[in-house]
Image (spheres, helix red, strand yellow):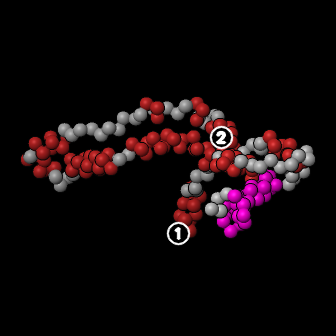
Amino acid sequence: MEYYVHFLVDSIFRPYQFRLLEVDAFRYRAADVIGKITRKRIREARLKEIKLELMNSERLRGYFEDHSADLDALRHDKFLSTAPQSHLKDVPDYMGKSSRGLFNLRRAKSRQCYKPSSWAKKVSEPGLSASNSKGISEKPIKLRKLKNHKAKMAMARDPAKVAQIKRQIALKKKANNPLFNFGKKGKGNK
């Protein structure tokens, strides 16, 4: 008998399978709702539940028959501000079931992958930068521009660029180190 009940429960209740991409569009709507939940509102809701339990209690029914003023005080309480926000009442078409998959997949793909930059498309051999494949000497990369995340990702696709950046950083550190400034004018000498 226990096996049969266990089998029935397993066959009826299954975890709901869905992709997070399908509910990604609802993230901001959920954040709006979560932002409205405060300790004060939670306390008010809990007090309202307790008052309803008091009014519906069988044990206190006799007390409230004798003391009707207390019952009126419980009934005439302010309502919780649970009015739905106007922008959360309806689900827009672009979040609806018909276009949900297409919209979210397109959005997720744009977040995950970066488009190769123009110099990466021109590279004929892997490992050579666009300037080296043409026979032109390497132009130094401006390191201050690498603070941008997209620039870093674009540079990281080309191993030659990564090596060039590492060389430039090493040379810059070496130039700033006073032990390597033998007689050169600059920061290390006085």
Q: Earlier in the sequence, mark 2 or mark 1?
A: 1
Q: Which residue occupies the foreground of this view, 69 or 101?
A: 101
Res 178 label? none
Q: Is residue 60 left or right of residue 22?
A: left
Q: Which residue occupies the foreground of this view, 4 or 19?
A: 19
Provide residue 59's location: percent of width, then percent of height. Answer: 17, 55
Q: Quadrant of residue 100?
A: top right
Which residue bears the numbered disc 2? 107
Main SS of residues in magenta: helix
Which residue bears the numbered disc 1? 2
Amino acid on which disc 1 is placed? Glu
Query: Residue 97 in magenta?
Result: no
Marks 2 and 1: which is nearer the front? Answer: 2
Q: Which residue is drawn at 81% across and 43% down?
A: 119
Magenta part of the protein: which range?
157-185
The crowding category of the residue bearing disc 2, from other C-alpha atoms within 10 Å (few below 14, some 14 to 19, many at least 20), is some
Q: Residue at x 54, y 60 (%)?
A: 9
Provide residue 143's location: percent of width, then percent of height. Answer: 69, 50
Query: Residue 160 in magenta?
Result: yes
Amino acid on which disc 2 is placed? Arg
Q: Is residue 58 above or below residue 99?
A: below
Q: Which residue is drawn at 85% across and 54% down?
A: 127
Q: What element does badge 1 sit on? A: helix
Q: Residue at x 43, y 42 (%)?
A: 33
Q: In this view, does 151 lie to the left or right of 10?
A: right
